[in-house]
Amino acid sequence: MTAREMVPEQFDAVVVGAGFSGLYTLYRLRQLGLSVYVLDAAGDVGGTWYWNRYPGARCDVPTTDYAYSFDPELEKAWTWSEKYATQPEILDYLRFVADRYGLPPMDTLSPADARALMAATAATRPPGPEVGEVTDGVIPGPSGDLPYRLYRPAGPPEGPRPLVVYFHGGGWVLGNLDSDDPLCRDLCQRSGAVVISVNYRHAPEARFPAAALDAYAAVQWADANATELGGIPGQLAVAGWSAGANIATVACQQARDAGGPHISGQVLICPVVDSDMTRLSYQENGDGYILTTALMRWFWDHYADRADRDDPRVAPLRGDLHGLPPTCIVAADFDPLRDEALAYARALDAAGIRVRLARARGHTHTSVTMVGVVISGAPVRAEIAEALRDFFPSAEPLEHVS
């Protein structure tokens, strides 16, 4: 897909990066009469001032010199509280500028435009590590074929490996095989397992329970075809991030209820496991950390009717958790979903399930998965790979990767 194809057709130009330079470019291009789309990996404005949140971060020159001077009316509309502004005030200033010049947040976009924004942003990221082999194909789903991408590790040992079925994040609305490609490569290389990433139907075109049904069908197919995929029969795990973790753990509940297939373990990275948005983490982290409360509400409204949101197939925390496989849960500090991930870990433990809880200290909902971008995510992903190997005690890991 070309950059032009990833941007909604009504725009003349796309600017990658929503920091000081990006917003200035937005203003100048609009002065020329162009319609402009601005993208940033953060899903928010700020650039450096979005990411640099360490204590004491502030401008090292007088902020009035650092701020914009292209619009006298803008200068009049904003008053700085101190000579050398801190990071939070600078970020608030850039958000003020974005609002003034019409840079919309993702939760105000249509699903098609939000998908375009996500795809264009992903096009600028590092590709992730090399693996031995990558192949694409399709599997039969409940309502048509589902695309998949298979990652096979490089190097010894030769022969079949454990198999991990992975589901991408994106709030049941966004994402595809490309969106989590670097993460799948990383998991494959670190764990030594064959990873098969399966796409699923997205809302609002296919609302609940379409994604959940597709996930269980994918797990059934992978189990039945383990040998052909290079997997070891009976050594199958599931994994997912965010909404992908939601349908992964729902698939585990469905497999238990149906008497199979056998699932050796589940890895849930910053999972959506409940529809209750009143938890403290929504209050603490509901704005400013990429996944916002407003965006989460946008996802829910596209995926599931309110009458369905207590159903365990969309809120698995409300289901019967007995008899589920060993579980690794990643909970990020600055994630609106943090508290429901912690609640799921506690509930699984109370149901007698072996749980490994990985606390991603200092991380947001998205940063653990940003392979090659956020370096501090590497130890968390190493712990995920270790958990996967623990699900398959006979599997041999590949050599360590950084």
Image (cartoon, grey):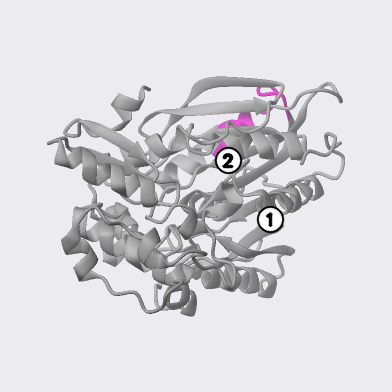
Q: Taking 127 as reference, is 60 above or below it?
A: below
Image quadrant where residue 4 sits:
top left
- Mark 2 and mark 1: span between their CA atoms? 16 Å
Q: What residue type is labelled 1?
A: Pro
Q: Pick the quarter of the image with the C terminus.
A: top right
Query: Which residue position holds label 2?
Result: 166
Q: In this view, does 111 lie to the left or right of 85?
A: left
Q: What element carries label 2?
A: strand
Q: Is mark 1 on a helix, strand or loop?
A: loop
User: Residue drawn 57% across and 34% down?
Assistant: 126
Residue 108: x, y in percent?
23, 55
Q: Is residue 32 left or right of residue 115?
A: left
Q: Can residue 304 be seen in this view?
A: no
User: Which comes sooner in the sequence, label 2 or label 1?
Assistant: 2
170 vs 143, nearest the viewer: 170
User: Residue drawn 26% across and 40% down?
Assistant: 37
Residue 160: x, y in percent?
78, 25
Viewer-side label of 2, 1: 2
Q: Residues within 10 Å of mark 2 (few under 14, many from 20)?
A: many
Mark number, residue 260:
none
Q: Is residue 248 left or right of residue 265?
A: left
338 vs 355, nearest the viewer: 338
The image shows a total of numbered marks equal to: 2
User: Residue drawn 47% across and 71% down?
Assistant: 86
First to last magenta residue range: 219-231
Residue sitting farthest toward the left: 33
Residue 320: x, y in percent?
55, 67
Q: Taking 198 as reference, is 374 above or below it?
A: below
Q: Residues within 10 Å of mark 1 (few under 14, many from 20)?
A: many
Residue 44: x, y in percent?
38, 55
Q: Is residue 259 left or right of residue 69?
A: right
Query: Which residue position holds label 1?
Result: 325
